[in-house]
Amino acid sequence: MKEIIEFFSNGGNMEMVYVIILSIILGVQIIESVPAVLHTPLMSGANAIHGVVIIGAIIIMGKAEANNTPALVLGFIAVVLGTLNVVGGFVVTDRMLEMFKKKPTKNKE
Amino acid sequence: MSDFTLEISYLIASICYILGLKMMAGPKTARNGNLLAAFGMTLAIFTTIYLYQYENDEKEIIGLSNHIWIFSGIAVGAIIGWVAAVKVQMTAMPQMVSLFNGMGGACAALIALVEFPKALIHIQDPIWLEDHNAILYMSTILCGLVIGSTSFSGSMVAYLKLNGNLKKDIRLPFYNIINTLLIFGVVGLTICLAGNHIPTENFETWTYILLAGASLYGILFVLPIGGADMPVVISLLNSFTGMAAMFGGFMYDNMAMLTGGILVGSAGTILTVVMCKAMNRSLTNVIFGAFGTGGKAVSASSNGAAQKSYKETNASDLAVLLNYSQKVIIVPGYGLAVAQAQHVVHEMEELLSERDVEVKYAIHPVAGRMPGHMNVLLAESNVDYDKLVEMDDINAEFSTCDVVMVLGANDVVNPAAKEDPSSPIYGMPILNVEDAKTTIVNKRSMNVGYAGIDNDLFYRDKTNMLFGDAKKVLTEIVSELKNL
């Protein structure tokens, strides 16, 4: 209990709680208005956005001392995997959405 | 100053994610929305590399080093990711999303793994403890580790299953009990470790046990799930990775990671719920329920198939029938996607439209392997957006249509969902294709669908079976139509 009060009385933490709650509401609101047609691209797009973990991987790599091999190797793998998530995710989403866009021009020929 | 610039760029990145997701909600703005989110991500990545600053052990404020390592990592990941994403076929999209999702989860778990030894040093340092909360810090690292590794192993199993490498839905005996025990064990161990209830010298061993347990849970959690539930699982794992990213953001006090992670976490959860609703199943049912249990259902259907009779038709008869119909509704399914028949089905639709036959597509929310899968596929072959009609809108129209063509769909047109309370898919909303005057079902054989259950529709009086690969059969129909 003491820890919980301590946690909330720290101004920075309260700010975090605000950010989290507002973001959750925002995420829910955005998705609820999406037609089922776009669910697959949307899932894929959201998938690309959580690739933002790559920032954590970059910070690890950047902080690692030159002699800290485990951190360097694991960090390197993490950067590669994170980039895969980001680049792959956005490209796949773009490919899916490209098809929605192409269609009206062709059909009116 | 550079700290301020970094914060501002994170703010811009967060706004980009939110607006990007919002724009993805409409078909017209969707593509730009995706590009906007990608822009935000690029901004956040590069400003982090150049502007991020931290206090090192000598209390100096310095920027990140090892730029060569970072950039080569990004280059390797970007090239592999780009090539994989460009080469993948539209039918293989679901497993690709699952694979990329697993990569993100693994990334989150690795971050936690590297930070962990540092955290062990920190929590014994009284100066560090003055302005940090040890329990909170430990919790974020461990949560990132657990959720990230669960998401990774689960996504890999989902990838293998969707890709066809793992065909069976493996159910260990008492798997529900084992899984429940495992999840309690993992959660309990996380609490013990975070709350410092375990002697510090054993800490590292227990953390590896935790990592192994969480990975094992991911595998066991996805293994028994099959049937039409796979997209729900991918969406759920997607939101898991989002949460893992959120814990990473907590750990580094990094706003870009935090907002991006939570957005995906909450959006993914809601998307999961929406998908469950489309199948009239609850999330607990998906995770713990018995769906397409394999053995029993399949053997029952093979017996049934031998006894019941069905009618068969051929391409030329069908072409005539279609030609003199007034209204035709096409029900596309996974079989169409596998056969890559989306272009030829569009060709047939155009031919019929020229002859004043009204053609529409009935899109079941979970047709294919993912919600919206059919829309993506048909859009690829330039089918008019207005011709794709969603289930609730088209169900009333079946009774007024002459011919329904079911192309490689099965479970979504199975009347058992309405009529047979003992059926595992009972309660799932379906397309009422049996209301039409004639129903044509194109399948490769009489085998059961993905849910592993028999479909009574095939044996009904108004149903005609048309066997063969969807693309081959449709090509025949198109050439017959041209001759008429």
Image (tube, coloured by chain):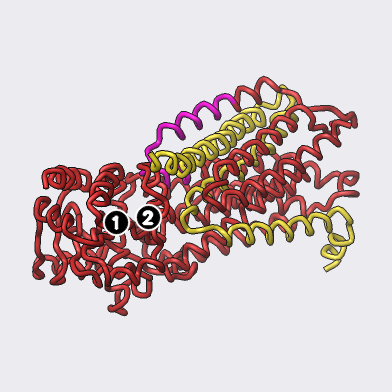
Q: Is residue B98 magenta?
A: yes
Q: Which residue is mark 2?
A: B387
Disc 1 vs disc 2: Cβ atoms closer than 8 Å?
Answer: yes
Instruction: Using the image as rendered, state which of residue A27 and residue A75 is in the foreground.
Output: A27
Task: Give the colour in which the image draws chain B.
Answer: red
Which stretch is magenta? Answer: B75-99
Q: Is residue B287 visible?
A: yes
Q: The residue under label 1 is which amino acid type?
A: Val
Chain label for disc 1? B
Q: Residue at x 9, y 55 (%)?
A: B317
Quadrant location, the N terminus of chain B: top right
Residue B219 to residue B180: above or below: above
Q: Residues within 10 Å of mark 1 (few under 14, many from 20)?
A: many
Q: Residue at x 58, y 24 (%)?
A: B75
Task: Give the colour in which the image draws chain A.
Answer: yellow
Chain label for disc 2? B
Q: SS class of the residue under badge 1?
A: strand
Q: Is residue B444 left or right of residue B234?
A: left
Residue B52 to residue B109: above or below: above
Residue B357 to residue B473: above or below: below
Q: Which residue is mark 1?
A: B359
Q: Is residue B28 magenta?
A: no
Instruction: Using the image as rendered, state which of residue B181 and residue A51 is in the foreground.
Output: A51
